[in-house]
Amino acid sequence: MNNYFTQLGAKVSQNQDMLFTFCNVMIKTSIEYTLYTQRGEKRLHNSTLDYRFIDSFIKLVVVLIDSFPNFSKQDFMAKIFHFIKLKLAEDHDSQLLQFNQKPFYRMLMSILTAVNMSEAFDYHTRKAILFDMAELLLEMNPNKYPAFAFAWLELISHRYFMPHFIKTTPATFNNEFQEEAETKYIQEQQQVQKWAKIKELLVSCFSFIKQNMVPGQSCSQALQQFYQATLRIVMVILKDYPLFLCEFHVNFVNSLPEHAIQLKNMILAAHPPNM
């Protein structure tokens, strides 16, 4: 088996387009087989969706990445993200009310789990891939793909994703005099970049609420649930990362509708923990 992947890696290094084409086809096929039987019959209930094809494909991706040491893992995963976005955009626009977000959530969640748990990804590679995933989620925000809203909200708030960006490094705030000035400056810039990603995602979330929760108009049950889920996310951030809300409170409040009083009050209640 090792010899097989060694030979395959040599072929792939010479013709990467072949591998990318294969992955593109596998993404489309695995999602289709999740939603439909091999006889073309649509699975009518979410409980009957067959995720084996998606799970197997992501496992194959990890094996391929781990087997080709000279292959750029970040570039490879960036291609995977690109293909997923294309498939989601195609299905979202063509299926309309019949669009099912669950296969896309399963695929992205499997990737997120693999990036965090697999030894195939070192710290720097993991960080780069998570930044690419943040860009992907920003492009797939509910303002553009409302039928993907709940899966999107679950992904950006997941413990495998958000803490990587929002958690502050101790040297940045608590050990200022124990680090060299240059090191401290680099850490601060890295923290700014991380916070900026989560800030953009949350602004997209709040903007979606602002566009759809119009004063004087009744909200759908789905939108009410989305708002309640957003409240819980902000509550966790307020409790564990109040400095983040302090830093961007103006951006957040301006992105919310005027009548979202509870959410605004939670954001404005944030204060540094040592005050």
Image (cartoon, grey):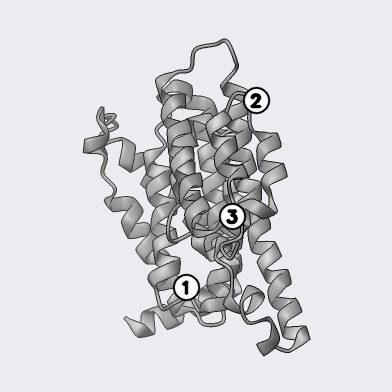
Depth order, front residue of 149/248? 248
Rendering quarter of residue 42? top left
Disc on the earlier residue, 2 or 1 = 1
Check disc 2 and report its element: helix, strand or loop: loop
Q: Position of residue 56 (x, y in %)?
A: 32, 59
The dot on residue 134 is: 3
Circle 2: residue type: Glu
Q: Vertically, is 141 above or below 5?
A: above
The dot on residue 219 is: none
Q: Position of residue 110 (x, y in %)?
A: 38, 57
Q: Is residue 23 left or right of residue 58?
A: right
The residue tagged 1 is 65
Circle 3: residue type: Ala
Q: Vertically, is 201 above or below 96?
A: below
Check disc 1 and report its element: helix, strand or loop: helix
The residue tagged 2 is 258
Circle 1: residue type: Ile
Determine if residue 25 is in view.
no
Which residue appears farthest toward the front when viewing the image? 275
